[in-house]
Amino acid sequence: MSALSDILVQLGVGVVPLGVAYLAFRSATDASKKSQQSALLQVEHQAEIERSKVDAEAFIRAKTIYEDALAQMEKQMTRMQGQASQLGAELVNEQSSSVAMRDQIRRLQAQIRALERTILALRSQLVDAGLSPAPPSDLTGPHLLRPQRSAD
């Protein structure tokens, strides 16, 4: 039995280094996996940082473009409001001129009606007096807007 126990001792002594070697192998592979995962996480983190930088730069460019467009629109709105105010003032002036001209036209029309009544009364007086009134002349008619020039 001593041979068997020697074999068992030798087997035990041979197995222990194999077990230690196996444990060392497992530890090395676990460490390698962890370092690979750590490296992968670090690469992903760096990529995320780069994406964030790109996104930040794009945001700044978009913000600048938006603010410039907004400033231009505000300038245009101010200019349009100025033009609207000016047009409003011109409209008020035109309306007051229009009202004044209408009043003047009404006064002139009233004067024309009064003159026509006076002419009718004078014609009637001439007829009553036994005289014949003169026919209306083209030169004094109410429809002539400007005097005619005679050809020399």
Image (cartoon, rainbow, N blue to C red):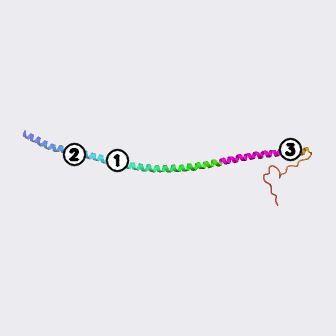
Q: Residue furthest right?
A: 130
Q: In the rendered structure, which disc, 1 or 3, sits on the residue that comes first in sequence?
A: 1
Residue at the location (37% across, 48% down)? 49
Task: Give the distance between the C-alpha atoms of the residues marked 3 and 2, in whole angstroms.
Answer: 139 Å
Label ID, residue 95: none
Callout 1 secondary element? helix
Residue type of the residue flagged with mark 2: Phe
Furthest-bottom residue in this view: 152
Sequence-wise first label, 3 or 2: 2
Q: Which residue is mark 2?
A: 25
- The residue located at (32%, 48%) in the rendering is 42
Q: Which residues are magenta?
A: 91-118
Which label number is shown at residue 121?
3
The total of numbered circles placed on residues is: 3
Q: Residue furthest top?
A: 1
Determine the CA span between mark 1 and mark 2.
30 Å
Q: Quadrant of residue 34?
A: top left
Q: Secondary structure at mark 2?
A: helix
Query: CA–CA distance between discs 1 and 3?
Result: 110 Å
